[in-house]
Image (cartoon, rainbow, N blue to C red):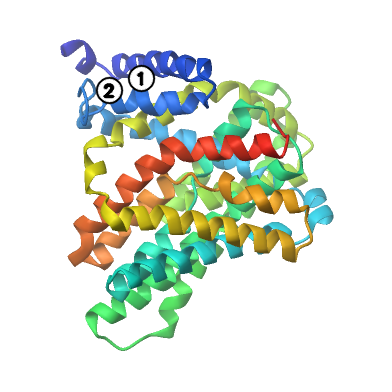
Amino acid sequence: MTFLTDSLFAPLSVLLMSGMLFGRIAKKIKIPSFIGYLIAGLLLGSSMFNILTDSMVESLSFVSSLALLLIAFSIGSQFKISYFKQVGIAPIVVAFLEALIAYVFVTVGFLLLGASLPFALVIGAISSATAPAATVMVIKEYKAKGPFTDLLLSVVAIDDAVALMLFGINAAIANVLIQGTSFNVLDLFEPLKEIGVSLLVGVLCGLFLAYLMRFFKSRANRYSLAVTVLLFGAALATSLNASSLLLIMALSATFANLSPHFELVSELVERSAPPLFILFFVLTGTHLNIWILPSIGVFGIVYIIMRQMGKSIGSYLGVSMMKLPKLQGKYLGYALAPQGGVAIGLTYVAQTIVPMYANTIQVLILSTVLILELFGPLLAQYALKQVQEI
């Protein structure tokens, strides 16, 4: 199919057109349109009709990276000082509890099924992660607004940091158990170092962006400057082995709180982002493999059930402790059901830590992510409807 291989423009056009078509169909049947984007990618990818080969998809990976930067920018902008003056540390407490209890439930569930301790610890840590991209897309599509939506966005952002911390700590413990080496307590601080570097550099980039804004007057130049600093921040994250998501969230939060030009830049980002978001989810869909679902087995079912129970119970406890409206605690766990890119990224790291379980981890997480990526957003949509914010 030389038309698709002659240049990058052909596969990009196919991705966009198919995404828009299936997104429209999804909207017609009243489900989030980006589920249609995922299905379009699934059909185009190597597990179905192989219209876009793995090499083509790999050559377009930069598009997904750009989209993730804009998603992180959107989430980070929710961290305004005015909001935290109203709610205090509630989002932090809720995020820690929902992630921690999901981790405990999945870990214990796997141990009861006879899994080894290193394997259960690593899988439990991966289960704590959510899918910020899916959550943001549901909120944007339905124009959700209100205290529940604000809490959800904050919790999703903090959850990423908690998931990285849990994974780093459990990876260090699993490594000691497998290798039989002496335990070095300093290894536990590695994930904290990654989070700290990400946040610090993000804040510095945000300060830099806010300062430079005063030298540019036109909307076009200010938007171009923001994109430049975003790309620069992402490059720094790669160089420093930091989390680009956390770094850009910190950048966005700093910029949102300090610059009077934030609303203008945010509006321009919102206008230019839709094609990138469509491409991101269609490309994500091309990585999904429907044929691994039969391999999910008892472990996969337990993973999904225990993770969701942990998210729901943890959210409810956190909301109750912080004396937030009970309705938020009742439905927040549903909105945290989606799981995607962060979990997949941690999976590839986990394969190097527990190589004897590499194939099992990959099949387990990729198959459960397929289910949670496709059906998790429906639970998020349901939650937002129940609290009457869409």
Residue count near mark 2 (Cα–Cα under 10 Å), binned few <14, some 14–19, many ≥20:
many
In primary-sequence order, the first of circles 2 and 1 is 1
Q: If the image is split into quadrants, where does the N terminus sit?
A: top left
Q: If the image is split into quadrants, where does the C terminus sit?
A: top right
Pointer 2 and pointer 1: residues touching (CB < 8 Å)?
Answer: yes
Residue at left 20%, top 24%?
Answer: 50
Report the residue marked by disc 2.
44
Which structural element holds mark 1? Answer: helix
Q: Nearer the viewer, residue 59 or 31?
A: 31
Answer yes or no: is residue 276 visible: no
Q: Which mark is residue 15?
A: 1
Residue count near mark 1 (Cα–Cα under 10 Å), binned few <14, some 14–19, many ≥20:
many
Answer yes or no: is residue 49 visible: yes
Query: As displayed, is residue 346 above or below residue 283?
Result: below
The location of residue 126, given as percent across then percent down, is 40, 59
The location of residue 264, given as percent across then percent down, is 72, 28
Residue at left 74%, top 32%?
Answer: 263
The location of residue 329, given as percent across then percent down, is 68, 54
Q: Which mark is residue 131?
A: none
Mark 2 or 1: the one toward you: 2
- Residue 204 lies left or right of residue 290; in this view the side is right
The location of residue 275, given as percent across then percent down, is 49, 21
Q: CA distance from mark 2 to mark 1?
A: 8 Å
Would you identify the image quadrant in which residue 149 lies?
A: top right
Amino acid type assigned to the residue bearing label 2 in the image:
Leu
Query: As displayed, is residue 354 above or below residue 210?
Result: below
Which structural element holds mark 2? Answer: helix
Amino acid type assigned to the residue bearing label 1 in the image:
Leu
Q: Nearer the viewer, residue 356 or 72?
A: 356
